[in-house]
Amino acid sequence: MVTTPHSTRRTFLKHATAASVGAVAAMMPATARAAAPFARAQGPGVYRYNLGAFELTALYDGIWYSPIGNGFVRNAGAHAVNGALARAFLKPNVLPISITALLVNTGAKLVLIDTGSAGQITDTAGLMSANLAAAEIKPDDIDVVVISHFHPDHINGIKTKDGDKVFTKAEILVPEPEWAFWMNEANLSRATGTVHKYFLNAGRIFKDIAGEVRRYTPGAELLPGIVSIPAYGHTPGHTAFALHSDRQSMLVMSDTVRNPYLFARNPDWQPTFDMDGPMAVKARRRMLDRAAADRMLVSAYHFPFPACGHMLRAGSGYELVPVMWSPLP
Ligand SMILES: [Zn+2]
């Protein structure tokens, strides 16, 4: 058979390829030939970092995809809000609300700041207790639970769905003005809609353990190195925190700033979930100003996991610069 140089080369390549594939297959163990099964799950949502002598553990609870309507931001239209979502590569008309609780080991006490949703808000959140276990901490190990405010995603982890206490040995600290507002029967009777549900939920969590709950005045130092900061507006007694250890400080901003791509970039926006919009804006600006000016490490309950980083001034707002994952705290 007469072949052209071109077809000879093609035949050679064909044979060479088939031979190499055969050789590689022969070297591989038989099990590797099967397709790997899809994992369809994440690893544990636990991230450790240090502040001075404190060890902090961010505990991921999940994410709540909350549909938002036209009037979601009182002083900005749906077009502007969807524009901000698009700039963050997010879908329109849905606000992703990531939830991360913060565990502080002061060396003397194990302190949990807010408690997650306990799987009672949405199917895509409720991982806090599994992640606590992954962090090798038992609920009974926690000495103090500090609450920022009484919204369900912050207090529901105090109890199981059946009403059992989760942190059986912990003292529970709550902001006094928050208690005064949500535990007031006259306020409950006036409330409607979602806020009414929040009142009932606060009662479910706290009524039968009222004697065991210690109320603090925002501004007070709660434990050595953990100082509460009044940041009212989101709710009447909404509280943030400053942590101090070995001359290092950080701000735990709670819900002062929620999704950073909306509310750090647009601190003046007044979403409907801030009960007093103008007051919440003042608290948000004050907190972000301090974080940026002092270049403080911050964490915020609804920032993307591990919910910590720094805030940088950018135009009339702020940008989150997330921490880079580090294998060592
Ligand atoms: Zn919240």
Image (tube, rainbow, N blue to C red):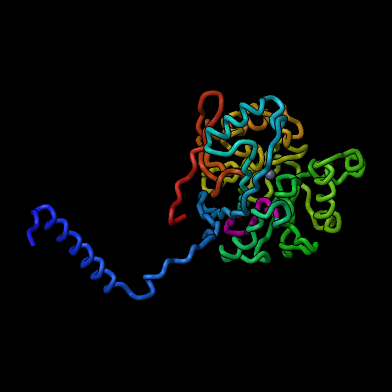
Residue 190: x and y, percent?
A: 90, 38
- Tell me: residue 44, above or below residue 66: below
Residue 311: x and y, percent?
A: 52, 35
* Depth order, front residue of 26/183: 26
Q: Is residue 282 left or right of residue 210?
A: left
Q: Is residue 88 left or right of residue 274?
A: left
Q: Residue at x 76, y 45 (%)?
A: 175
Residue 251: x and y, percent?
A: 59, 41
Q: Residue at x 62, y 52 (%)?
A: 62
Please tell me in which quadrant of the rendered image residue 206 appears: bottom right
Q: Is residue 119 left or right of residue 12?
A: right
Decide whether residue 108 is among the magenta residues: yes
Q: Is residue 303 left or right of residue 203?
A: left
Please tell me in which quadrant of the rendered image residue 263 appears: top right
Quadrant occupied by the N terminus: bottom left
Residue 289 visible in the displayed image? no
Residue 38: x and y, percent?
A: 49, 63
Q: How many marks?
A: 0
Q: Residue at x 45, y 47 (%)?
A: 324
- Tell me: residue 73, above or below residue 298: above
- Tell me: residue 268, above or below residue 98: above
Please tell me in which quadrant of the rendered image residue 162 appears: bottom right
User: Which range of residues does the magenta coloring cover?
Assistant: 103-117
Q: Residue at x 49, y 42 (%)?
A: 322
Residue 68 visible in the displayed image? yes
